[in-house]
Amino acid sequence: MEISSDSLRRYSLAVLVHVLLVVAWYLFVKLGDVPKYVMPTPGEAFLALFTGSYGWWQNVAVTGAEIFGGYFLALVIGVGLALLFTWSRWLEELAMPALVSLNMIPKVALGPLIIVWFKYGVWPNTLIAFSIAVFPILLTTARGLREVEPELLDLVKSLRGSRWQLFVKIQLPGALPYIFSGMKVASILAVAGAIVGEFLASDKGLGYLMLQVQVTLDTAAMFMAVILITLIGVLLYGSVLVLERIFVPKDARIA
Amino acid sequence: MEPFIHLDGVRKVYRKGKSEFLAISDASFDVMPGELVALVGPSGCGKTTLLKILAGLHPHDAGTVRIGSDAHPFDPSRDVGMVFQQPLLLRWRRILENVLLPTEILGLPAKESRERARGLLALVGLTGFEEKYPYELSGGMQQRAAIARALVHDPKLVLMDEPFGALDALTREKMNLELLRIWKESGKTIVFVTHGISEAVFLGTRVVVLTAGPARMADNFDVALSYPRTLDMKTQEKFGEYTRRIYRLLDME
């Protein structure tokens, strides 16, 4: 991949802005003489990784598994249901109104219920992440699969093309930009879902850890937990962007 | 010689619930093999409907539609090429791959099809653009690629639905000349739908005039202007007579 001077400029600018943010954080704490239990310096937050026995990596692994697991489940089921709907108009008309209503439920409010049904732990938190991430993927994919120009349909029909050919050659690739736009929204929601689950009830994970260290006012560890959660989210979002770059040509991408 | 297309009293009514809409009536005309017939008329005159009937996309309600003859057999599944007002190229495919779409649907051999597609891209003046994406081409160039796509499976009949309607006036004139050249070189039978009266006369070996409200066929005449046609023919007396004849039928005089 070639990097033009323009994109090089934009990337360096992005890095610079982040460095400046950390510097501003540091100066704010130092110059404002903010107590450590209110806000640690970036260095103190980083050192929290090595002080205390918080089992960071195990917690990162648990939260990561919940986020990625819930997200992957949402992707498979969301895209799968949308595909089913394009093959059966009847099924779509039957299911869509219910799905739209279900989408209106604030999924976070389902958290306590899911915990009642499935106890607490990794699995219910994965389910909460799934339930919040599945709808944007399902709804945008279904929409993308519907968006076929009628004339293209005529073109395929005039050649007596099959339903399957229409789907593989035109509908599915045409829907990819929509699928990716839903996937991007879902990647952010999945992170929120998993953390909410951990706040509600769990015995491991970064969200759980935050509640633990809150009691002892180890604010530096709380900061570090937030940073790690963010990094997991960035990793997920970044993977989606990379896949989009591979599968969707530049002008077809939806922001 | 036997006509390639024979239409007699073709009628089409669209029904939606209890309401009916007469899309076309009294359409009777013949198209000889290798002719370029222009169907001209205002919006709602049924010209697109007629094209869809010829493409086998819509059934007709009454009359006769016969395509093909003993000398020129016609297979409805692989002898129709279509060009629309929008190029409708697939954004995610390169130009060459876009042109190849019909051959993939028909399951034609890949290697020969690629060679043919390259040849057709040369014919429409797009050599060097095979590996570009549609968005890298201008509207006129995209429409050239769409014409190559309509020819790639070597259909006997090419149906064009206002193919230059979305282009600016200058590009449109240029594309008219290009189309005449491509038509001569490929020897296809072309049915060309337009609402441009001068475009119809300039291109057609024959012009079929359709009127709206009620939708019916109003006229069908040969254009006695020689090929190759040039833009200064548009200033000739005979050209003016033909266009006036159409304007009169469409109540625009």
Image: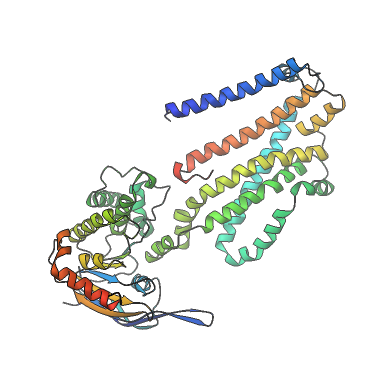
B102 vs B134: above or below = below
Q: What quarter of the picture does the C terminus of chain B occupy? A: bottom left
Q: What quarter of the picture does the N terminus of chain B occupy? A: bottom left
Residue under the image location 69 percent in, 36 percent down: A65
> Is residue A160 toward the left or the right of residue A108 in the image?
left
> Is residue B149 toward the left or the right of residue B237 in the image?
right
Quadrant of res B42: bottom left
Residue A207 visible? The answer is yes
Q: Residue furthest right?
A: A215
Q: Residue furthest front?
A: B253
Task: Tell me how many marks there are.
Answer: 0
Q: Position of residue B246 (x, y in %)?
A: 25, 74
Q: Position of residue B61 (x, y in %)?
A: 40, 82
Quadrant of res B24: bottom left
Residue under the image location 72 percent in, 19 percent down: A28
Of residue B69 and residue B252, the one placed in the foreground of this image is B252
